[in-house]
Amino acid sequence: MERITPLLWLLFSAGGTVAAFLFPIHLLLTGLAFPLGWLDPPRYDYVHRLVAHPLVRLYLFVLISLPLFHWAHRFRYTLYDGLQLKHLTALIAVLCYGAALVGTAAAAYLLWSIA
């Protein structure tokens, strides 16, 4: 586990950066601006064409996957330090990062299967 620790910290920090800079914009648009009528929501066909572009798919993949690893790392250490579950170190790591990997794989499959 010590060999991949730097990679896990890298994913943690990258996910935190993505969550801090990109999530608020998406929440503002989809949670306030479109529902309250401040902006006209885009039509389905426009959004579908937009998401079909490879760079937009890559952007959405990063937007989804990196915060999952940020969550996994933060939740792992919350369980270790906050709940004092250090005796379950390996199991917690596998479950947390496994969930992030499953979410990343699901996002990749769904984004790249859009016709």
Image: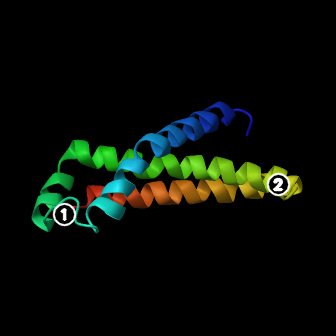
Please rate how many residues cluster around mark 2, counting C-alpha atoms within 10 Å: few if below 14, some from 14 to 19, many from 20.
Answer: few
Q: In the image, what residue type sits under mark 1?
A: Pro
Q: Position of residue 25 (x, y in %)?
A: 36, 48
Local secondary structure at mark 1:
loop
Q: Who's the residue at 66% across and 35% down the image? A: 4
Q: Who's the residue at 78% across and 56% down the image? A: 79
Q: In the image, what residue type sits under mark 2?
A: Gly
Tell us which disc is closer to us: 1 or 2. 1
Q: Nearer the viewer, residue 2 or 70?
A: 70
Local secondary structure at mark 2:
helix
- On screen, residue 109 versus residue 91, left or right, reads left
Marker disc for residue 41: 1
Q: Nearer the viewer, residue 113 or 19?
A: 19
Q: Position of residue 81 (x, y in %)?
A: 83, 50
Please rate how many residues cluster around mark 1, counting C-alpha atoms within 10 Å: few if below 14, some from 14 to 19, many from 20.
Answer: few
Q: Is residue 42 above or below residue 89?
A: below
Q: CA distance from mark 1 to mark 2?
A: 42 Å
Marker disc for residue 16: none
- On screen, residue 114 versus residue 19, left or right, reads left
Q: Who's the residue at 52% across and 42% down the image? A: 15
Residues at discs 1 and 2 in contact (Cβ within 8 Å):
no
Point out the image quarter for the N terminus: top right
Q: Who's the residue at 48% across and 59% down the image? A: 103
Q: Is residue 54 above or below residue 38?
A: above
- For label 2, the residue is 82
Q: Position of residue 105 (x, y in %)?
A: 44, 56
Q: Earlier in the sequence, mark 1 or mark 2?
A: 1
Point out the image quarter for the C terminus: bottom left
